Image: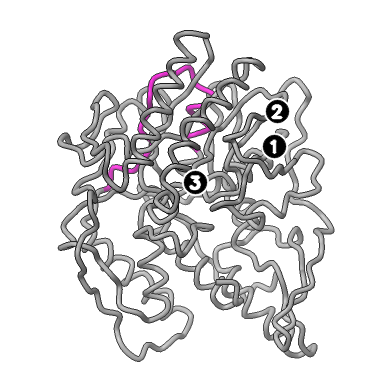
Amino acid sequence: MPSSSVKDTQTLDKDGQEIKSVGFQRFGFDCEVAIDSLRSLYLRSHYVVSASESQVQELDAKEEEGHGYLTQGPNAYQSKSIFHPDTQSISYTTLSRFAPVKLLPSSSRKRILVTGGAGFVGSHLVDRLMLLGHEVTVLDNFFTGSKTTVSHWVGHPNFELVRHDVVEPFMIECDQIYHLACPASPPHYQFNAVKTIKTSFMGTLNMLGLAKRTKARFLISSTSEVYGDPEVHPQPEDYWGHVNPIGPRACYDEGKRVAETLTYGFHNQDGVDVRVARIFNTYGPRMNPHDGRVVSNFIVQALRGEDMTVYGDGKQTRSFQYIHDLIDGLIALMNSDESRPVNIGNGDEFTIGEFAELVREIVEKVQKEDGITLERRVQIVYKPIPTDDPQKRRPDTTRAKNSLGWQPRWSVRMGLEEMVRYYKAKMSEGSM
């Protein structure tokens, strides 16, 4: 790529050290991947605009600035479908070449099933596992997930995508199961509360039955919501929680709690090898901009020049971890010997009001760097708080540090800048 169109930028961790790769070599499992290889899969445009040659060159330069700002790695592994703006139509093409993956001997190559693998978290996990050279099967009913998040792997000999609802049984041979399937944002899991709790229970029951039959190791993505509106702060894994069993969030909260109960039932009764990850607030590229989560809401509103909406007085607190830290934690837990529940989250705590100001500052920084002049500064407005919205949420990650050797590397500021650039590039190409 032309050096003139891409600014040289470094990604620094919390200690000021440059992040050149994600993952680790631990527990006999190598999951280290160059950050540029990962970024090339989600920070690149997936189509070009049909136009004259001079216009194409100009558009290519803009695309490099938008998507390529943080990617210094390969860009030859993306499809270049043609978008026709006059008819608002797109002509798709397949990839001519897949991103390079590790060539593993059969003794090291695992058969891995990822339910919900076309969702936000699942798609990033799939990218990592594919680049590492494993055989990956994705199961998804596309209720909240999207084919586009994993379309760059369709056709690869190590990859299979199956449209399937985990509420129904599924048979396959596998070595590891990452069970992520379940709507995770309030608008989605409240849309059909009965289906949400059915997915949590029946889906987990079916996948645990599969793990029992194949003797696969099973990891369930639980949630910080099992702690409800906590009376203990920060929340350790041995805290039982403070949950309203009949409130609007109960279908998700209690669904995940019963899924954990079921998981340990199979572990204690049938000897299934299980792992339980309690995931705290996570953000990053591929988050659905319309799923009602605070990070995506703030960024999209600020980029569009709309006032940012804070629910309540803004004094409730949250902690936010970047997606790459979460994927590191999930893979570490899966391949460790830790069978107890493990919190995976970032201990850096913000009030929602402070977080809104940080997002506004980063969006203004990115817009200034790209030469965008703002007519007015985005304001922060306050509205009534939703029912049962927790006042505090921050993980005690002592167990993850001691048992997994894991702790977050990405600062909230660095992760937010990458996500702002992702959304900004998506807006500029017209796909959001």
Give the CA distance from mark 2 to mark 3. Answer: 22 Å
Are discs 2 and 1 less than 8 Å apart at CB? yes
Above or below — where is 151 with respect to 52? Answer: above
Which residue sits at x=20%, y=70%?
382
Residue type for callout 1: Thr
Above or below — where is 184 with respect to 414? Answer: above
Q: Which residue lies furthest to the right in this view?
A: 96
- Residue 83 is situated, as x and y percent measured from the top left of the image, at 73, 78
Q: Residue 324 carries which label?
A: 3
Q: Which comes before the other along the chain, label 2 or label 3? A: 2
Above or below — where is 213 with respect to 256? Answer: above
Residue type for callout 2: Arg
- Mark 2 vs mark 1: in front: 1
Q: How crowded is mark 2: few (under 14 residues within 10 Å), some or many (20 or more)?
A: some
24 in the magenta segment: no
Disc 2 designates what residue?
Answer: 111
- Residue 180 is situated, as x and y percent measured from the top left of the image, at 52, 38
Q: Which of 386 and 348 is in front in this view?
A: 386
- Secondary structure type for disc 1: strand
Q: Residues within 10 Å of mark 3 (few under 14, many from 20)?
A: many
Left or right of residue 241: residue 322 = right
Which residue sits at x=43%, y=38%?
197
- Mark 2 vs mark 3: in front: 2
Which residue sits at x=30%, y=80%?
378
Disc 1 designates what residue?
Answer: 137
Which residue sits at x=47%, y=30%?
201
Res. 351 image quadrant: bottom left
Query: What's drawn in magenta, residue-wise?
Result: 328-348
Left or right of residue 398: residue 149 = right
Q: Which comes before the other along the chain, label 2 or label 1? A: 2
- Secondary structure type for disc 3: helix
Residue type for callout 3: His
